[in-house]
């Protein structure tokens, strides 16, 4: 049953300030799968799996992916996942789609005691789709889908260096879209990083304000999910000057869940604006949007804040659930995927719960409106999270996954997603770790994964 607060909510409903940096599924069939387990009876026969995994210890499958120097910056230091070094220019276009919502054409003046219909009183957005069509979504047998056993065999045979070479081939391809809107003079200052721009063909188009044609721009792209078009909005961490646009996007796209995979400050650098209040009961205002933090649940690896988002022009109130993963290390990737997998599953379950709370008011895809996912640039950790979510959904549904094809598809909609080779390797090992903890695999012998030389294939 949805919480009483959720029901009430639906019824009532720097340029980083310091600098612009240059040069640089849900549970299947609508049922809950519960919180990620520890693996219980899983038998592990690999030299690199943490020996505690089978017994429910705190470790996992991931090794030190940063040790080989393949992700060093020009000065020999290991960059963060948002230190962009080799982004290129681009070419061509695409299309947009639309939400399917039951909505009421009228809006009341007060949110107190308002009906469910008043929540969705606005016209559905025309630029996003959560429709039922599987066309062009990450659903079919195209690409090179593999069973989890085949993935283990492939990872074992190729080793880390083989996966890194595979990623290098993907990364070497030029972007297949244009960035015209992102490069418009009035929009340049809205990009956190000058060379992390958003494609024209998949960009989220905001409503135009004050007859300003550039007011519809935000550095955000729709990304397809498993059997769901535009399942995600992949975006940069909001800047102080774009926080209003961020909440406008959340409102206009009817988003329910925000996934944040960075901390506001990392290594003494601003990675994202503080676009919400982290304290219970506190209120932040951005133009006509009031964001009140109702509850905060602090966990070891992530923090969940339940918020009420109010449009003061209409007095409508909606619930938004904010999920911030705080255990991504300053360098490289997490030592174990377990915390990220648990975080991902809980966020998915929250989305499903909130969609159920809408009842018949939501007439779109059963998985609901797009989930907003961001880190700092919106390509590294963001792409990693989305890749894992898609591959897990497919693995649970049909027993196969295509990590390489998934990354290629995501990069065709959000340029440069999966930014570093260690993130690509992490996706493979994390999917294997997921299969082990879910009982889809009984063992995974990856001995020698780190030790294979470049010619071992």
Image (cartoon, grey):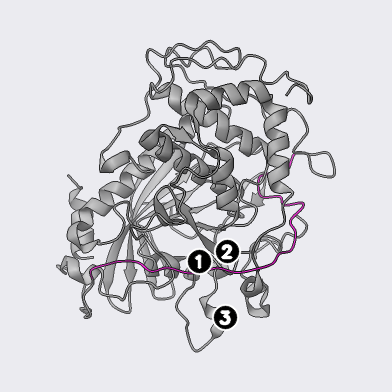
**Residue shown at 72% from the left, 56% from the top:** 174
Helix, strand or loop at label 2? It is loop
Tag shown at residue 214: 3
Per the picture, the main secondary structure of the magenta-coloured stretch is loop
Q: Is residue 100 magenta?
A: yes
Q: Give the Cα distance between marks 2 and 1.
A: 6 Å
Q: Are marks 2 and 1 in contact (CB under 8 Å)?
A: yes
Label 3 and label 1: CA atoms lie apart by 16 Å
Residue under label 1, please give it: 243
Residue 250 picture quarter: bottom left
**Which x, y percent locates residue 212?**
54, 86
Task: Tell me the residue that label 2 is attached to.
Answer: 239
Whether residue 332 appears in this view of the structure is no
* Quadrant (top left/top right/bottom left/bottom right) for the N terminus: top left
Give me the residue at 62% from left, 55% from top. Answer: 377
Residues at marks 2 and 3, CA–CA distance in whole angstroms: 17 Å
Q: Quadrant of residue 369?
A: bottom left
Span of residues in magenta:
78-102
Pick whichever of labels 3 and 1 is earlier in the sequence: 3
Q: Is residue 85 left or right of residue 387?
A: right
Is residue 380 found inside the magenta-colored segment of the image?
no
Q: Of the residues under marks 2 and 3, which one precedes in the sequence?
A: 3
The image shows residue 215 at horizontal and vertical percentages of: 53, 79
Please provide percent x and percent y for residue 162.
70, 29
């Amino acid at each position: 049953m949805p919480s009483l607060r959720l029901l009430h909510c639906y019824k009532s409903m720097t340029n980083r300030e310091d600098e612009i940096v240059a040069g640089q599924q849900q549970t299947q069939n609508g049922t809950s799968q519960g919180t990620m387990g520890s693996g219980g009876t899983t038998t592990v026969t690999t030299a690199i799996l943490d020996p505690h995994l089978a017994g429910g210890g705190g470790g996992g499958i991931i090794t030190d992916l940063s040790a080989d120097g393949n992700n060093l910056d020009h000065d020999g230091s290991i960059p963060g996942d948002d230190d962009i070094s080799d982004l290129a220019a681009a070419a061509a276009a695409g299309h947009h789609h639309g939400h399917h919502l039951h909505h009421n054409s009228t809006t009341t003046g007060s949110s107190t005691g308002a009906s469910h219909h008043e929540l969705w009183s606005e016209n559905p957005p025309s630029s996003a789709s959560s429709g039922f069509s599987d066309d062009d979504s990450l659903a079919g047998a195209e690409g090179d889908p593999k069973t989890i056993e085949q993935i283990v065999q492939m990872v074992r045979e190729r080793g880390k260096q083989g996966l890194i070479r595979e990623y290098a081939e993907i990364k070497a391809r030029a972007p297949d879209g244009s960035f015209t809107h992102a490069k418009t003079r009035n929009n340049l200052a809205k990009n956190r990083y000058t060379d992390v721009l958003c494609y024209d063909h998949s960009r989220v188009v905001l409503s135009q304000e004050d007859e300003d044609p550039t007011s519809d721009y935000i550095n955000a792209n729709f990304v397809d999910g498993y059997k769901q078009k535009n399942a995600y909005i992949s975006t940069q961490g909001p800047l102080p000057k774009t926080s209003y646009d961020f909440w406008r996007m959340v409102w206009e796209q009817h988003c329910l869940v925000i996934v944040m995979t960075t901390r506001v400050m990392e290594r003494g650098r601003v990675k994202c604006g503080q676009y919400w209040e982290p304290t219970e009961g506190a209120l932040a205002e951005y133009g006509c949007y009031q964001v009140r933090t109702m509850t905060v649940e602090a966990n070891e690896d992530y923090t969940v804040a339940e918020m009420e988002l109010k449009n003061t022009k209409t007095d409508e109130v909606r619930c938004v659930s904010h999920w911030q993963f705080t255990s991504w290390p300053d360098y490289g990737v997490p030592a174990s995927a377990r915390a990220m997998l648990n975080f991902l599953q809980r966020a998915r379950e929250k989305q499903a719960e909130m969609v159920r709370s809408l009842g018949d008011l939501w007439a779109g895809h059963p998985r609901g409106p797009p989930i907003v996912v961001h880190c700092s640039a919106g390509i590294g950790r963001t792409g990693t999270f989305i890749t894992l979510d898609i591959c897990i959904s497919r693995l649970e549904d049909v027993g196969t996954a295509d990590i390489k094809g998934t990354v290629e598809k995501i990069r065709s909609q959000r340029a440069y997603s999966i930014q570093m080779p260690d993130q690509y390797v992490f996706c493979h090992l994390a999917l294997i770790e997921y299969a082990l903890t879910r009982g889809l695999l009984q063992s995974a012998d990856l001995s020698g994964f780190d030790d294979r030389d470049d010619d071992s294939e």
